[in-house]
Image (spheres, grey):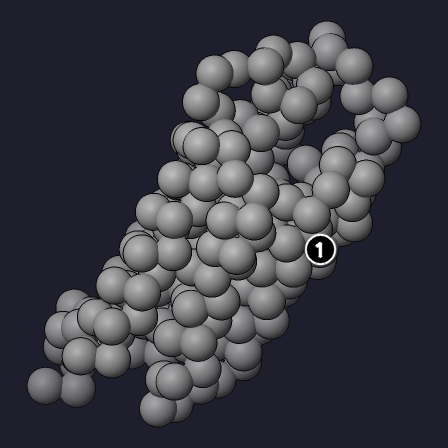
């Protein structure tokens, strides 16, 4: 089981929640300065949480870099509609680092999961194609390919030999929430303008990033089978 929260972790969580609420308030009252000041902080605090871990391996460092690219994507998406493509590229690079992280402790193919993930990608792209992606069609297609690959590699770790179960579960949930967030964002941008979608998008996004952060934090801990054999 994961260790109990330290005082430092509790402080980071409290600060993150305050800035998350500030961003949501900025959404509700349509305050651009408040949104810009608050949006990147929760993800940066997740990266800081991993940086403060006493021992970090390749998995943790890859996720830290991915989180930093995610924070950059947050900033760019909020900065201006003209920066959307650059924000998309930042998130895409972040997902590549998450894929590499998930590959550090599990490389089994699990083709059934891959097929399911990519079928979802085909489905969501086909649905988005009903709208007006325009020049964004190719970047969106590439992004969907990368994020569904990230989901595949997160799911492949679930119940994999030698992988901490809590880490695998957190990573899978994180990938699912991240995919849900990006799917809703894309639907809102290209198909339907859904009311209050921005708040749902950001909440599911933060949960997704938190899941991947916890997957990294717990990845180095022994699995139940390893603890049993050691005992």
Q: Position of residue 35 (x, y in %)?
A: 52, 47
Residue 62 lies left or right of residue 129; in this view the side is left
Tell me the quadrant of the picture where the C terminus can be found. Answer: bottom left
Farthest-out residue, top:
130
Which residue shows up at 44% across the image and 22% down it?
Answer: 196
Q: Position of residue 167 (x, y in %)?
A: 33, 63
Q: Position of residue 25 (x, y in %)?
A: 39, 40
Which residue shows up at 38% across the image and 56% down it?
Answer: 19
Q: How many marks?
A: 1
Picture layout, residue 168 above or below residue 173? below
Residue 16 lies left or right of residue 179; in this view the side is left
Decide which of 221, 225 is in the foreground and name it: 221
Farthest-out residue, bottom:
54
Picture layout, residue 49 above or below residue 171? below
Asked whether the viewer can see residue 127, the reply is yes
Decide which of 55, 135 is in the foreground and name it: 135
Picture layout, residue 126 above or below residue 141? above
Which residue shows up at 42% across the image and 31% down it?
Answer: 28
Residue at the disc numbered 1: 90
Q: Position of residue 108 (x, y in %)?
A: 52, 57
Picture layout, residue 30 above or below residue 224? above
Decide which of 108, 9 is in the foreground and name it: 9
Farthest-out residue, right:
135
Tell me the quadrant of the picture where the N terminus can be found. Answer: bottom left
Dot 1 falls on a residue whose secondary structure is helix
Which residue shows up at 48% across the image and 55% down it?
Answer: 38
Asked whether the viewer can see residue 178, the reply is no
Determine crowd level at label 1: few under 14, some 14-19, many 20+ residues with C-alpha closer than 10 A: many
Farthest-out residue, left:
231
């Amino acid at each position: 089981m994961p260790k109990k929260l330290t005082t430092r972790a509790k402080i980071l969580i409290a600060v993150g929640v305050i800035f998350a609420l500030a961003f949501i308030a900025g959404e509700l009252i349509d305050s651009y300065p408040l949104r810009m000041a608050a949006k990147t902080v929760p993800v940066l605090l997740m990266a800081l949480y991993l940086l403060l871990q006493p021992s970090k391996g390749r998995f943790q460092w890859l996720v830290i870099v991915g989180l930093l690219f995610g924070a950059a994507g947050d900033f760019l998406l909020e900065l201006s509609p003209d920066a959307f493509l650059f924000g998309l590229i930042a998130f895409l690079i972040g997902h590549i680092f998450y894929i590499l992280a998930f590959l550090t402790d599990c490389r089994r193919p699990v083709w059934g999961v891959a097929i399911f993930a990519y079928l979802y990608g085909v489905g969501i792209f086909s649905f988005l194609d009903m709208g007006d992606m325009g020049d964004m069609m190719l970047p969106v297609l590439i992004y969907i390919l990368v994020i569904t690959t990230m989901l595949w590699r997160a799911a492949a770790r679930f119940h994999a030999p030698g992988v901490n179960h809590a880490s695998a579960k957190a990573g899978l949930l994180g990938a699912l929430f991240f995919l849900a967030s990006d799917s809703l964002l894309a639907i809102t941008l290209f198909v339907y303008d859904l009311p209050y979608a921005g708040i749902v998008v950001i909440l599911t996004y933060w949960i997704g990033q938190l899941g991947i952060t916890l997957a990294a934090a717990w990845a180095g801990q022994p699995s139940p089978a390893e603890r049993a054999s050691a005992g």
